[in-house]
Amino acid sequence: MEDSFSEIAALIGDKTRAKMLSSLLDGRAYTSTELAIFADISKQSCSNHLLKLVNGGILKVEKQGRHKYYRFADDKTATVIESIAYLLPPRNAPQENKIAVKGIKYARTCYDHFAGKVGVDITRAMVDMELIVRKEDQFSITNNGNEWFEHLGIDLNLLRNKKRKFAFPCLDWSERKFHIGGALGAGFLIFMLENDWIRRIQHSRVITITSKGRSELKKNLNLEVK
């Protein structure tokens, strides 16, 4: 076990591969050329790193036409990679508390669900409104929650039938609190994107909250965001 652990740690601990893995945490698949640009390395070097990550079970490759696309092997792997950032010590905590949180710490994707301060605030608002309740390592939907999600047009039965955890507390590395992961977290992120509550920033995990999103979050969750 110790040898296997060391191999995995070395695999993801390499600085170049860490950049590539960080890029993939936006939930999208990328070609080796794109990942080479993100990591600022040659295509040949990138291919060697990708081969190691695929053989190590961290990534999987999918072929579409003439192109090969790389993504995380599964959502569990992505969650582990994201969670590693939680081990980083907070920097200048007293000063940071006086400064408005922005950028990637404010609103971002955590693989395929919402993270950052806004993601944590959404989760807290859902708990406060008794739409969801935490039971150890998972979130459950209350009767009020069922009606709330149904009113928005989110199909909970469809999300429950996906071959993954339905809803679990995902530890947010920047807030040191939990946001919603799993099928429910992914489903709500897709809903917000499709309804223009939020927008992605190209080649970034940062999320922008639209004016419509601010209005809808206030109306539906009594949550004020900037």
Image (cartoon, rainbow, N blue to C red):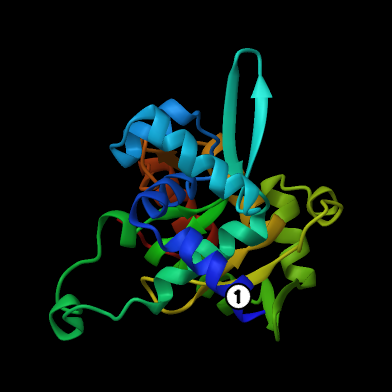
Q: Is residue 205 above or below residue 99?
A: above
Quadrant of res 39: top left
Pinpoint residue 178: horizontal percent, then vertical percent: 52, 75
The outermost residue toward the top is 66
* Circle 1: residue type: Asp
Q: Height in image: 222 above or below 186?
A: below
Which quarter of the figure is the N terminus placed in?
A: bottom right
Q: Residue at x 16, y 85 (%)?
A: 94
Between 202 and 11, which is closer to the camera in this rendering? 11
Q: Locate residue 142, reporting x and y percent.
A: 76, 73
Horizontal side of 142 relative to 5 (left or right) equals right
Q: Residues within 10 Å of mark 1 (few under 14, many from 20)?
A: few
- Residue appearing at x 80%, y 70% in the figure: 143
Residue 130, x across and y down, in percent: 65, 77
Q: Is residue 191 visible?
A: no
In the rendered image of this protein, does residue 92 appear above or below residue 146?
Answer: below
- Give the labeled residue for mark 1: 3
Q: Is residue 209 left or right of residue 76?
A: left
> What residue is rendered at 76% in x and 60% in y?
147
Q: Is residue 97 visible?
A: yes
Q: Relative to residue 86, is residue 191 drawn left or right?
A: right
- Residue 45, by quadrant, is top left
Nearest to the observer: residue 73 or residue 115 = 73
Residue placed most toward the observer, 123 or 52: 52
| Picture residue at 77% right of the left edge, 62% below the top | 146
Task: Estimate the x, y position of residue 9 in percent, counting from the top left.
Answer: 50, 68
SS type, badge 1:
helix
Establish if 15 lies above or below 99.
above
